[in-house]
Amino acid sequence: MAHQETTLDFWSLKAVQLARECRSIANGEPGDVDPKLRSEAAQLAMEFQEALQLSQDEFEDQARRAALLAALRKRAIEILVKVNPDA
């Protein structure tokens, strides 16, 4: 996370935390991020929010939500690694 000075294990972050980090990148922190990457971070933050609000009533709903969150998580971590190569 660009605004923190400690090393963080991105894989330990929860979906809500990853969404927050993506939103932070989208909002300009840090300032030297490629605009395309910043735009993708904004899209991921929005998709995280939508995925977290999906129904979990049925087993199929739970499986669909878990799969979507796993895919979003992987891409969010890839972006965080690009933005924070020293983390």
Image (tube, helix red, strand yellow):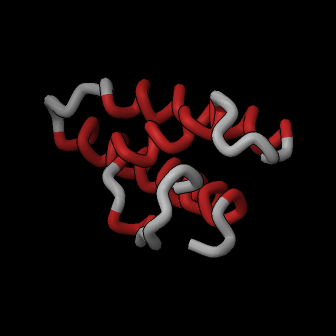
- Residue 18 percent location from the top left of the image: 44, 47
- Residue 3 percent location from the top left of the image: 54, 50
* Closest to the observer, 58 or 22: 22
Residue 84 horizontal side relative to residue 45, left or right: right
Determine whether 64 is above or below 1 in the image.
above
Measuring 55% from the left and 33% from the top, which residue is drawn there? Answer: 23
Measuring 69% from the left and 57% from the top, which residue is drawn there? Answer: 83
* Closest to the observer, 8 or 63: 8
Residue 56 horizontal side relative to residue 86, left or right: left
Q: Residue furthest front?
A: 5
Picture quadrant of residue 19: top left
- Residue 45 percent location from the top left of the image: 53, 33
Picture quadrant of residue 40: top right
Determine whether 5 is above or below 29 in the image.
below
Measuring 69% from the left and 33% from the top, which residue is drawn there? Answer: 28
Residue 33 horizontal side relative to residue 56, left or right: right
How many labels, in total?
0
